[in-house]
């Protein structure tokens, strides 16, 4: 089987790494891939957003399965384009992908379907949004608001505002300065929720829903959840807070109603449905967001724990027989630590040589997934993005998994490298 993976980040490296273990895969391609992916797959000079180029390649090379990593091509309709040519592709079509492509659309679907979420309002006018925020702070002094860009913003379009001035600055940044382009032309203003966050992902063929192991992501750039939001600085799985009983509730209250609501539109949701949830102090569940793809870096923690052949699951989704696939997981823990470029999530240098990868390449129970990397003319691995590497440690418990991840991190170096030192730490203290 020939498989094409679309994307070039840490999530896609984890997908390629897992697919390379399947006896069903005879040829692996990645577009555009990265330095780490090139060890497992043929990397193509095609951008993940070049739908026409990707489609032409898949047709000419008789690709049997295309797996889409990032959200941008999904929202742009890559699945629709491939399916019109009779090609098998993993991911939701353009309309279902609006669950991530528009926060306003997603909130409306939640409201109509009775899916629990924060109170909200949607605005296309800066003045109207500012007026609303001012009134909210006047009505509930000291209660923060959350301002979100309506469209995709690489995980950075969410700003928690604790004062009216902060809310005005956030609205100006998104709606006037267009810091996130057209994604910020419309905004969602939400009530601020207290509690613990978790990422719940599930495979679905539009009818059957197969939950993955729960993950907790660390969005803030600094230890103890300080500093600005990022695409994710690390994660761990499973999440002790998410008991089997609580997860069953989340499936019944959030994931399944979303899949059913999309199916009622006439286009089934097929792919990965990712729900970011908040577990409030009183034990209730609230939906923070939906994503239409594998999480990043969550995938780098989850796939090493997957026992089942990933190809079987992907085909179960694309061919609508997921109910026939027995999905099994290893009873272990995983901790993924992201190594970022100096300056990230702001401006950062590129082309910085990375040392120490050889020392960690053969460590047992450690996986190093490349995100923003490339090869220079001399064949040396260099930085090529904000999030550079994801180092995942596995263990029989969190202490062991965490120790293995950070021991590997100590062997890797590039100028400006920074990372959080507290990924999964609270679970070790339990």
Image (cartoon, rainbow, N blue to C red):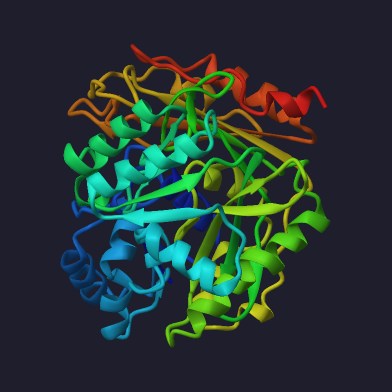
Instruction: Tell whether 155 sits left or right of 215.
Output: left
Could you say where residue 260 lies in the image, as x and y percent from the top left?
Answer: 57, 79
Quadrant position of residue 225: top right
Q: Residue furthest top?
A: 415
Q: Is residue 284 above or below residue 240?
A: below
Instruction: Tell whether 125 sits left or right of 90.
Output: left
Could you say where residue 243 lies in the image, as x and y percent from the top left?
Answer: 80, 50
Could you say where residue 34 lies in the image, as x and y percent from the top left?
Answer: 32, 41
> Does the image show residue 386?
yes
In-front residue for pair 67/239: 239
Instruction: Tell whether 194 sits left or right of 282.
Output: left
Could you say where residue 178 lies in the image, as x and y percent from the top left?
Answer: 19, 41
Image quadrant where one finds the C terminus: top right
Quadrant position of residue 72: bottom left
Image quadrant where one finds the N terminus: bottom left
> Does the image show residue 30?
no
Q: Is residue 416 above or below residue 388?
A: above
In-front residue for pair 12/1: 12
Residue beneath the point at 35% across and 74% down: 95
Number of marks present in the image shown: 0
Instruction: Tell whether 23 sits left or right of 215.
Output: left
Residue beneath the point at 53% across and 36% down: 140
Q: Is residue 61 above or below residue 27?
A: below
């Amino acid at each position: 089987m020939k498989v094409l993976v679309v994307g070039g980040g840490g999530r896609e490296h984890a997908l390629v790494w897992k697919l390379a273990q399947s006896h069903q895969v005879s040829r692996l391609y990645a577009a555009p891939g990265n330095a780490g992916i090139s060890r497992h797959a043929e990397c193509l000079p095609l951008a993940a957003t070049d739908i026409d180029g990707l489609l032409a390649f898949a047709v000419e090379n008789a690709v049997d399965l295309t797996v889409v990593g990032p959200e941008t091509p999904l929202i742009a309709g890559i699945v629709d384009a491939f399916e019109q040519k009779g090609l098998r592709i993993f991911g939701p079509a353009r309309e279902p992908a609006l669950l991530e492509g528009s926060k306003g659309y997603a909130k409306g679907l939640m409201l109509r379907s009775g899916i629990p979420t924060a109170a909200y309002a949607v605005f296309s006018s800066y003045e109207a949004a500012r007026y609303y925020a001012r009134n909210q702070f006047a009505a509930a002094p000291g209660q923060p608001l959350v301002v979100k860009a309506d469209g995709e913003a690489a995980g950075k379009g969410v700003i928690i505002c604790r004062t009216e001035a902060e809310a005005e600055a956030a609205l100006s940044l998104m709606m006037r300065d267009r810091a996130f382009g057209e994604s910020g032309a419309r905004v969602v203003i939400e009530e601020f929720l207290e509690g613990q966050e978790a990422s719940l992902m599930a495979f679905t063929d539009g009818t059957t829903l197969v939950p993955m192991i729960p993950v907790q992501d660390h969005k803030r750039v600094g230890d103890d959840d300080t500093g600005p939001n990022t695409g994710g600085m690390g994660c761990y799985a499973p999440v002790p807070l998410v008991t089997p009983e609580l997860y069953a509730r989340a499936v019944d209250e959030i994931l399944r109603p979303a899949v059913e609501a999309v199916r009622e539109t006439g286009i089934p949701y097929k792919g990965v449905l990712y729900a970011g949830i908040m577990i409030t102090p009183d034990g209730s569940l609230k939906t923070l967001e939906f994503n239409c793809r594998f999480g990043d870096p969550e995938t780098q923690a989850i796939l090493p724990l997957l026992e089942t052949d990933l190809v079987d699951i992907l085909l179960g989704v694309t061919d609508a027989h997921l109910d026939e696939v027995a999905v099994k997981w290893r009873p272990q823990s995983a901790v993924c630590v992201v190594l970022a470029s100096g300056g990230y999530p702001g401006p950062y240098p590129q082309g910085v040589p990375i040392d120490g990868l050889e020392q960690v390449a053969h460590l047992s129970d450690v996986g190093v997934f490349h995100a923003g990397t490339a090869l220079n003319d001399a064949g040396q691995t260099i930085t090529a993005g904000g999030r550079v590497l994801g180092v995942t440690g596995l263990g029989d418990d969190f202490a062991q998994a965490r120790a293995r991840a950070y021991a590997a991190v100590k062997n890797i170096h590039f100028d400006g490298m920074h990372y959080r030192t507290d990924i999964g730490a609270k679970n070790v203290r339990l």
